[in-house]
Image: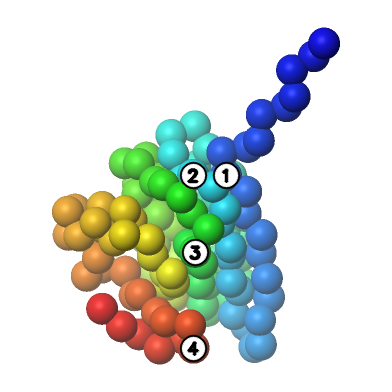
Amino acid sequence: MPEPAAEPALTVDVERCTGNVYVVHCHGRLVAGVTDILSAKVVPLIPQTKRIVLDLSDLKHTDSMGLGSLVRLYVSAKSAGCSLELMHLSKQIQHLLGLTHMLSVFTVIGENGIKFM
C-alpha cells in the first residue's frame, strides 16, 4: 500500500486587503528546504504594492534559513520602497529575532495594524 503523501512543511496564502496591502498567511514550518515557497509568493508582490504583512500566527517553527529568508524579503521590499511587516509572532520566533537582534529591524504590528514591541 502506498504511503500517504507527507504534508508540505510550509504553505502560504496571499490575501489582498483594502487599498494596496497584501497579507501573507504562513502555515507550518519555515525551515531549510522550503524557504523558496515563501519567496515565490512574496517577491512578485513587492513591485506592485507599498505594504506586505506576513501573518505568522500559524507558523509553528523557523530556523536560521527561515530567518535568512525573512531578512532577504525585508531587504528586497525596502529597496523597492515597500514595507514588509510581521504580525502574530510566536514565542519561538520572537526569541530567534531577539537573539539575532533582528526584532528591532522588523516592524511588528498588532491585529489592527498598530505597531508594537
Q: Dot 1 corresponds to which residue?
A: 10
Q: Earlier in the sequence, mark 4 or mark 2?
A: 2
- Which residue type carries mark 4? Asn
Q: Dot 2 corresponds to which residue?
A: 29
Distance between mark 1 and mark 4 Cα atoms: 25 Å
Q: Earlier in the sequence, mark 2 or mark 1?
A: 1
Residue 104 location, x and y as percent? 22, 70
Residue at 38% across, 61% down: 90
Residue 80 visible in the snapshot: no
Distance between mark 3 and mark 1 Cα atoms: 13 Å
Residue 13 location, x and y as percent? 66, 59
Q: Quadrant of residue 41?
A: bottom right
Q: Quadrant of residue 78?
A: bottom left
Q: In this rendering, would 57 be left or right of 7?
A: left
- Helix, strand or loop at label 4? It is loop
Residue at 48% across, 82% down: 111
Are the residues at dot 2 and dot 1 in contact (C-beta closer than 8 Å)?
Answer: yes
Q: Dot 3 corresponds to which residue?
A: 57
- Which residue type carries mark 2? Arg
Give neighbour class at mark 2: few <14, some 14-19, many 20+ (Cα, 10 Å): some
Q: Quadrant of the N terminus?
A: top right
Q: Dot 4 corresponds to which residue?
A: 112
Are the residues at dot 4 and dot 2 in contact (C-beta closer than 8 Å)?
Answer: no
Nearest the viewer among 19 and 26 is 26
Residue 33 vs 20, above or below: the answer is above
